[in-house]
Amino acid sequence: MGFCEVVEGRHSIRAFQERDVEDASLEAILRAARRAPSAGNLQAYRVAVARASSVRRLLAQAALDQGFVAQAPVVLVFLADAAASAVKYGRRGETLYATQDATIACAYAQLAAANAGLGSCWIGAFHEDKVRAALGVEEPLRPVALLPLGYPAEVPRMTPRRSLAEMVLDIREDA
Ligand SMILES: Cc1cc2nc3c(=O)[nH]c(=O)nc-3n(C[C@H](O)[C@H](O)[C@H](O)COP(=O)(O)O)c2cc1C
């Protein structure tokens, strides 16, 4: 699949087969995430790979009881490492760059998952303290996104997008 096909073909998946995710696919996804840009190349994030069913259940509960999170055989959790970014960038690193680093890495992982024929869904609605407790990690690590991964058990719903004209602020003239 070419890049544009992967981008166009990715849709959120909220139902998963029991079939496990192959280690090679998971590694390819993690390698893609690691290629993401990051402020000062500090890579100020961690990725938790949750395969244990008990942990996946806790993550689903933390995510406001979105049960399909536990149905996925793997749940990746992207955690911003504010302390790592603050070392070089101070408050901006702490409050912005670490979050961006983790977010971009998750976006790369989601596309890599689509490229591997896997379904995923970005999960942003969760209680941060409950996610930390489920993973056994502490502040300043901040969960930014959960990404349940698995083989799809549904045909994805096509979601519309606004027109480019609505999206783009077209600034052509010199001020
Ligand atoms: C920041 C963010 C938070 C999201 N949180 C959730 C969520 O908690 N639960 C969920 O089912 N989908 C969640 N989504 C997925 C969106 O609903 C989905 O990406 C959007 O409707 C577009 O559909 P598509 O991914 O199929 O293109 C989230 C997406 C983003 C980017």
Image: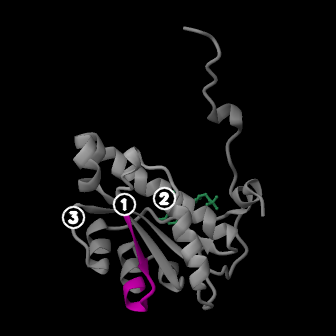
State the count of labels. 3
In the picture of the structure, the residue carrying the numbered disc 3 is: 139
Comes first in the chain, label 1 or label 2: 1
Label 3 neighbourhood size at 10 Å, few (<14), some (14-19), many (20+)? Answer: few
Residue at 39% over, 45% down: 39
Gap between marks 2 and 3, in whole Å?
Answer: 20 Å
Query: In the figure, residue 163 lies in which quadrant?
Result: top right
Question: In the rendering, at what x and y percent does residue 94 appear?
Answer: 26, 48
Question: Foreground: 28 or 168?
Answer: 28
Question: In the rendering, at what x and y percent does residue 134 appear?
Answer: 31, 80
Q: Was residue 49 drawn as part of the magenta stretch in this picture? A: yes
Position of residue 4 relative to residue 46, above or below, is above
Q: Give yes or no for contact between labels 1 and 2 (Cβ–Cβ under 8 Å).
A: yes
Q: Looking at the picture, which amino acid does disc 1 mark?
A: Tyr
Q: Looking at the picture, which amino acid does disc 3 mark?
A: Glu
In the picture of the structure, the residue carrying the numbered disc 2 is: 105
Label 2 neighbourhood size at 10 Å, few (<14), some (14-19), many (20+)? Answer: many
The answer to whether residue 89 is visible is yes
Residue at 70% over, 36% down: 164
Q: Magenta span covers which residues? A: 46-56
Residue at 30% over, 66% down: 128
Q: Was residue 70 drawn as part of the magenta stretch in this picture? A: no
Task: Provide the secondary structure element on which disc 3 rests.
Answer: loop
Q: Is residue 161 left or right of residue 29?
A: right
In the picture of the structure, the residue carrying the numbered disc 1 is: 45
Image quarter hosting the C terminus = top right
Comes first in the chain, label 2 or label 3: 2
